Each structure stands twice: as structure tokens, then as C-alpha cells.
Image (spheres, rainbow, N blue to C red):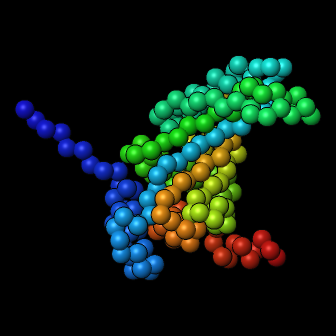
Amino acid sequence: MSTATTTAPRMKELFETEVWDMVRSEHGVTNPMALPRLQKIVLTVGMGNQLDGTKLNPKAREQVIEDLSLITGQRPIMKKAKKAVSNFKLRIGYEVGAMVTVRGDRMWEFFDRLVTLAIPRIKDFRGLKDTSFDGRGNYSFGITEQGIFPEIDMANAQYTHGMNITMVFSNSTDEITKAALKKMGFPFVKPADKKKKRA
């Protein structure tokens, strides 16, 4: 009888070795239970512009569900409006978007594909903002087209949509999260590019 051995995702191993060593040495965190952890990654797609009366455009709804399923490996849930907004003809209970939350090894594998495959495919990419933190160590950013993910075949896509991606950390601060993401190869905008934009 053969026993299959499973290896931890490489980004998880990198986080639990090099990132934790960096946090210990540079931020003085010695208690193992106080080290930062990436708890989950949340992907959301807003679809309010696809509302047709009381229902979402069926084709757009179906494609967003299929795209998020291919990208993350699990089916998203549909989010409904909690407030009515008369200017947008929006009522409570209307479906206005989709959301999927990934955790565990699936989260680390998604993170790996995001950093090494998807983000480098963004057109005219010069780095992600390093200021999009929420004050509690969580980082969010948006993309404008699902086609950056190699799982998506844009030739068959009838509806182009972006998404927001939020990385939720525990036991962290904005400074620690930024340093941890940099250590893992996250492509933040370089200082030289910041100066060019200001000029």
C-alpha cells in the first residue's frame, strides 16, 4: 500500500519561513502565536450596471459565476442589495454582485498564480499602489478585466468585468503586511515610478 505525500504550497512555505523570520528580526515579534497570518482572500464583482428591471442580465450573471469558479476553484455566492437607492432604481433584495472567499491551500495556490501569472499580464503594468491598506493590515486592490487570469478565454467572453481582491491578515499592521507582501514578490509600484507620476 502506497502512501501519498502532500507538499505545502510554495507560497505558504515561503511565508512561514522567510516572512516570519523577517517579522521576528525587524519587528521584534517573538511569540509564535503573534506572528501575522494570511487568513483569506476575498474576490468581489459588482454587477449593478447589469440590472435589467428586477433581475441581472442572465448572460452576465452566468459568466461572472463561471469566471470566478475557474479562477478560484469554488463557486461564488450572489450578493443582494441591503439598501434601496431610488436614483439607481435599486431595491432591497436585488442581486448586485458576486463574491467568493478562498482559504487554506486553495488560497495559497491562488495567491501564487495571482503574483506569478495574472498580475504581470496587466497591460502597461507599473505596479500596484502601496497605500491601499485599511489600517488593520488588510490590503485591497482592483483589476479592470478578468482576462489577466490564464484560466479565462476572452475569445468566448461576452461580458468584460473587473473585480476587487482583498487580502485579510490577522496579527498584522499595514507596515508588516506591506513588508510581507514585498518579501513574497508582490509587485508594488517602485519609488522611481511614483516620482514620474507626480512630475
Name the residue located 46 percent from the left edge and 52 percent from the top edge.
39
Name the residue located 64 percent from the left edge and 40 percent from the top edge.
44
Q: Position of residue 129 (x, y in %)?
A: 67, 63
Q: Position of residue 156 (x, y in %)?
A: 63, 26
Residue 123 appears in view: yes
Q: Give residue 160's quadrant in the image.
A: top right
Q: Position of residue 116 (x, y in %)?
A: 49, 54
Q: Position of residue 107 (x, y in %)?
A: 45, 46
Judge whether 66 appears above or below 111 on screen.
above
Between 99 and 65, the residue placed more toward the observer is 99
Between 106 and 191, the residue placed more toward the observer is 106
Q: Give residue 25's quadrant in the image.
A: bottom left
**Figure quadrant of the C terminus:** bottom right
**Figure quadrant of the N terminus:** top left
**How many numbered marks are there?**
0
Name the residue located 54 percent from the left edge and 54 percent from the top edge.
168
**Which residue, as the protein is rendered here, is positioned at the far left?**
1
**Which residue, as the protein is rendered here, is positioned at the far right?**
87
Residue 187 appears in view: no
Judge whether 50 appears above or below 140 on screen.
above
Name the residue located 61 percent from the left edge and 48 percent from the top edge.
165
Q: Give residue 6's quadrant in the image.
A: top left
User: In the visual, does 11 lie left or right of 57?
Assistant: left
User: In the visual, does 184 lie left or right of 132?
Assistant: left
Between 77 and 186, the residue placed more toward the observer is 77
